[in-house]
Image (cartoon, helix red, strand yellow):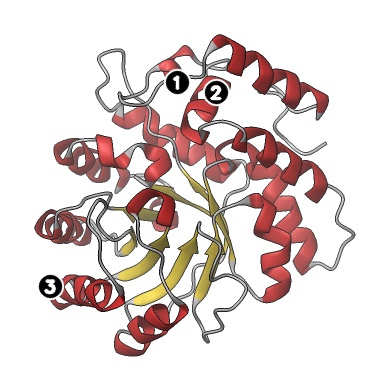
Amino acid sequence: MTEIKGIYAASLSILDNNLALDVHKTIQHAENLIEMGCHGVAIFGSTGQSQLISLSEKIHLINELSKSKFKDKYIIGTGLNSLSETINFMKISNTLNFNKFLIMPPAYYKYGDEDVINYYSRIIEKINDCKIILYNFEKLCGYKFSKECVEELVKKFPDQIIGVKDSTYNLFETIKIKNFSVLPGSEGKLLKGLELGCAGIITATCNVTAPLARKVYDDFYKNNTQTVNEKLCNVRKVFEKHNLISALHTFMSKKDKIYRNILPILSLLSKNEEKKLFEDLDKLEFNINNLKVN
């Protein structure tokens, strides 16, 4: 099994003024996150508006992403309900030497553990060269992974099912599988998760908290006193008061107006929400020009 360890951002997708995916700026944003402290980046997760971006745009981006100086540090999200499109997108990714994937079960329909096991089994039957991180986010897809389902998938596919991103938080305290990466979806769970044996985090707000999260991670492994974890958790709490994608794009737009572009049905924060976001962050001495750890 291959473990995924460290601080991973669920990267934003950058759109041009016509709401088309700006491939080069999206890749530049992802590379900046790694330079700011992330061990890697998940492309086309829910934070990256994956479900709203066309398959052709995704294919264009991964073709260019294959030329990135940080090529080995990316996890590719699929963000597709269609089984055949998921498989085809993974096949194309394989030809570009990407084999780490973040895959959520399809949204909308009601199903159980056996159906989920069948779904991932069909993917792996077609794509043997894959390292899959299960995406556990009941709020988005309507299904919550059980501990037993995860254990059965790992037992069935030990070389392919290598981890879980736990954004529902029903797994990270109880899953104990050797060489299997458990990654909560919030900075608020980072330190506790590490103490429990988790591998790190994959989160939306690491688009802005990467240096703080990396310091908490590094200090844990160096047995240093934690000096920024409280601030990290408080910043996360501020963003959680709002739709995370809307809040992150609103926050980043203070640096570059291109972040104001967001795909319907999403929107930026209202003026009142924006005011509240920045007031709360100012109280924490956290702003767009001061993202690095002091």
**Numbered circle sitting on residue 259:** 1
**Three-letter amino acid code of the residue under disc 1:** Tyr
Residue 4 in the figure: left or right of residue 63: right
Query: Residue sitting at 26 percent across and 45 percent down?
Result: 62
**Three-letter amino acid code of the residue under disc 3:** Lys
Question: Residue 132 location in percent, x, y?
Answer: 34, 68
Say if 280 sits above or below 232 in the image.
above
Circle 2 sits on which residue? Answer: 252
Q: Are marks 3 and 2 in contact (CB under 8 Å)?
A: no
**Numbered circle sitting on residue 126:** 3
Say if 88 sits above or below 45 in the image.
below
* Residue extending farthest front: 110
Say if 197 sits above or below 103 in the image.
below
Question: Residue 240 location in percent, x, y?
Answer: 60, 38
Residue in the foreground of this view, choosing between 211 and 178: 178
**Three-letter amino acid code of the residue under disc 2:** Met
Query: Residue sitting at 29 percent across and 59 percent down?
Result: 98
Q: Are marks 2 and 1 in contact (CB under 8 Å)?
A: yes
